[in-house]
Image (tube, helix red, strand yellow):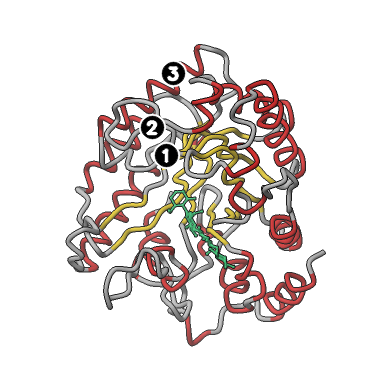
Amino acid sequence: MDRRALIAGAAALTLSTPACAAYPPGLPPLKSVSTYPLGVAVRHLHLSDPDWARLAVTNFSQLTAEWEMKMEYMLRDDGSLQFDRADALAAFARTYGMKVHGHTLVWYAQDGLHFQKLKGTPDAFLNAYVAYIQKVTGRYGGIVRGWDVVNEPIWNDGRGLRPCLWREVLGDDYIGLAFEAAHQADPAAVLFLNDYNLELTPAKRTTFLKLCERLLKEGAPLHGIGTQAHISADLNPAAMIVAIRDIASLGLQVHISELDISLRGDRLTNVVKPRLDQLKVFEAVIRAYNDVPARQRYGLTVWSLRDKDSWLNSKRERKGPIADAPVLFDDRGRPKAMAERFVEMVR
Ligand code: G3I
């Protein structure tokens, strides 16, 4: 058991009722009214923040590691694995009866020196690829409900599969191979293909869904679709409704896997959009997901607990002096209009 997580958790338990000053009267914990698992992204450093722990444990039933369950963190250059922070996250979830969504096993954006060194030996590369997936997936059986087995496989304009090291060495079948390996390691896990801009770019969504259909036809153990929903306040709300309906039409589990609604519009113009637009877009997300058949609603995950925790306010992503406010709780952990609207709308 990770000592820091235990201490934080103890603080969370002793302070499990939200400080009344921070909460509007009568707003119930979000997970208590949700009809599906409600998730939040977490980084290891959050586990030792009592304010974070109390707010997350009170309102959410599932955690997604924002970073520490990815290859970028877990795979060392010599091929060995470091599970310390992922184990701490799993321990925290067990302590508070939460589930974990595993993110992510295979991603074009992260391959690491260990695999780069095996590029010239495809058999060794394949063995290492399967071994990595099975060691990670197998370790968290029972606490990880589902995995983003492959993340962001499609070009952003929808022209086809992205080039990546996995595809270069193993061919297009790198995706099916990953799903087979994960399923063998944890037959109970719900296995997802996860991508972004599926609401913003219909051509990408079409290509993505065709890939899902091909995988199913080939017998891949694909159980669900993760639509990240990193969206902006200037998204046409109707686009969200159409996208979720399209995605749900395959009959698979649907995970709104990384929801945040940037106030920075298309994030190029850096125009701060009025919060009203943000609320309209958020309402469209909840309305769209309410219309997904209950048996297909794997859950909705918000990509950070408080505005200040958001990747959009990290040094790398923040554009200019104005902080973004993309999620349901403000920097002090107070629920915002989106949190209140969630309680009003979820069914
Ligand atoms: O915390 C370490 C710090 O100790 C170390 O000194 C530093 C050295 O670079 O790294 C820090 O870790 C950073 C980590 O975020 C935690 O803050 C990593 O560099 C940085 O790469 C990592 O960025 C994450 C990014 O994915 C890449 O893994 C973001 O937090 C995370 O929000 C972002 O999430 C992605 C999803 O996985 C996929 N969908 C898009 C989404 C947003 O880009």
The residue carrying mark 2 has its beta carbon less than 8 Å from ligand 1: no
Q: Amino acid at mark 2?
A: Ile
- CA distance for labels 2 and 3: 14 Å
Question: Label 3: which residue?
Answer: 213
Q: How many marks?
A: 3
Mark found first going from the N terminus, 2 or 1: 2
The residue carrying mark 3 has its beta carbon less than 8 Å from ligand 1: no
Image coords of residue 16 (percent x, y): 65, 76
Question: Label 2: which residue?
Answer: 154
Q: Amino acid at mark 1?
A: Asp
Residue at 17 percent of width and 66 percent of height = 271
Crowd rating for badge 3 (residues with CA inside 10 Å; few <14, some 14–19, many 20+): some
Is mark 3 in CB contact (under 8 Å) with mark 1?
A: no
Image coords of residue 344 (percent x, y): 38, 60
Is mark 2 in CB contact (under 8 Å) with mark 1?
A: yes
Q: Amino acid at mark 3?
A: Glu
Q: Quadrant of the N terminus?
A: bottom right
Is mark 2 in CB contact (under 8 Å) with mark 3?
A: no
Residue at 43 percent of width and 73 percent of height = 308
Q: Is residue 24 above or below residue 225?
A: below
Question: Label 1: which residue?
Answer: 195
Residue extending farthest to the bottom is 21
Q: Nearer the viewer, residue 163 or 37?
A: 163
Residue at 47 percent of width and 74 percent of height = 26
Q: Is residue 235 above or below residue 202?
A: below
- CA distance for labels 3 and 1: 15 Å
Q: Nearer the viewer, mark 3 or mark 1?
A: 1
- CA distance for labels 2 and 1: 8 Å
Judge from the rendering whether residue 245 lies leftward or rightward of residue 140; answer left or right. Answer: left
